[in-house]
Image (cartoon, rainbow, N blue to C red):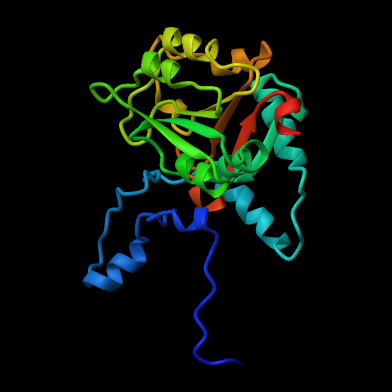
Amino acid sequence: MSEGLPPPRPSPHISKLVPYQPGKPIAEVRRELGLSDVVKLASNENALGPSPKALAAISRAAAQVHLYPDGSCHELRKALASNLQVPPDWLVFGNGSDELIHLLGLAYLQAGHEVLVADPTFVRYEAAALLNQASCQRVPLREWEYDTDAMRRAVSSRTRLVFLANPNNPTGTYVGADGFAALVHTVGPDIILCVDEAYFEYVDAADYPDSLDYVRRGYNVIVLRTFSKIYGLAGLRVGYGIARPEIVA
């Protein structure tokens, strides 16, 4: 091997990325600080854990870990399609919602395109833009709530993806039905509105929008959901998206 050579450099757009800093695992904190009891709040993990039925299903499946999984997620696809009342081919599955966010970037972004997000919001949206040489347009929250009027004004001819965490991570605030409808009707035929509903099961507000209704009506909307939060299955990394097959095929 040659000595003294400089290391290869990544592509310039990759160099702009700031590494994601996840919450430290409990075991690591125990080792570092010599603690026995640690309560972790950094990653919004479900402290109650999964359902006993989920644990039983995991136990049954453990005997088959030497086999590759069903890439089509047939059983999960069938169950979710029935539960959500959508056709099975409207569903796409990922290694958590994170993977689907990055797949959207791979599929729909290139140099010169723009991603529109709130600020602050989930950091993975900006990463999806930068990984694909697109720029990220941030619209500040107003009093910690979404400013949908400002977001609508920020849509440009370069916009290709609008990411909306509803409710927002990290603020917990949400876009109501009226603001959501206005935003949906702003996006043009070249734009996809990605609604990240990782925490939607926790919302009980009467004016929380029915995002799936817009999917069913043919709008350029994809809804992302996950089994990581309310179902307590973060370690399994099961996320899914709902959209017309023209978007997710």
Residue drawn 30% across and 48% down? Answer: 41
Residue 152 location (% of width, % of height) = 44, 16
Task: Examine the rendered structure and indicate whether residue 22 appears above or below residue 211.
Answer: below
**Nearer-the-camera pick, 95 or 60:** 95
Task: Examine the rendered structure and indicate whether residue 242 appears above or below residue 213.
Answer: below
The quarter of the image holding the C terminus is top right
Q: Could you tell whether 146 is left or right of 67 in the image? A: left
Task: Examine the rendered structure and indicate whether residue 45 appears above or below residue 194.
Answer: below
Residue drawn 59% across and 40% down? Answer: 105
Q: Could you tell whether 196 is left or right of 151 in the image? A: right
Residue 189 location (% of width, % of height) = 65, 18
Q: Quadrant of residue 245?
A: top right
Residue 242 location (% of width, % of height) = 64, 28
Residue 132 location (% of width, % of height) = 58, 46
Residue drawn 46% across and 41% down? Answer: 126
The quarter of the image holding the N terminus is bottom right
Q: How many marks?
A: 0
Residue drawn 67% across and 30% down? Answer: 80
**Nearer-the-camera pick, 231 or 172:** 172
Task: Examine the rendered structure and indicate whether residue 224 appears above or below residue 40.
Answer: above
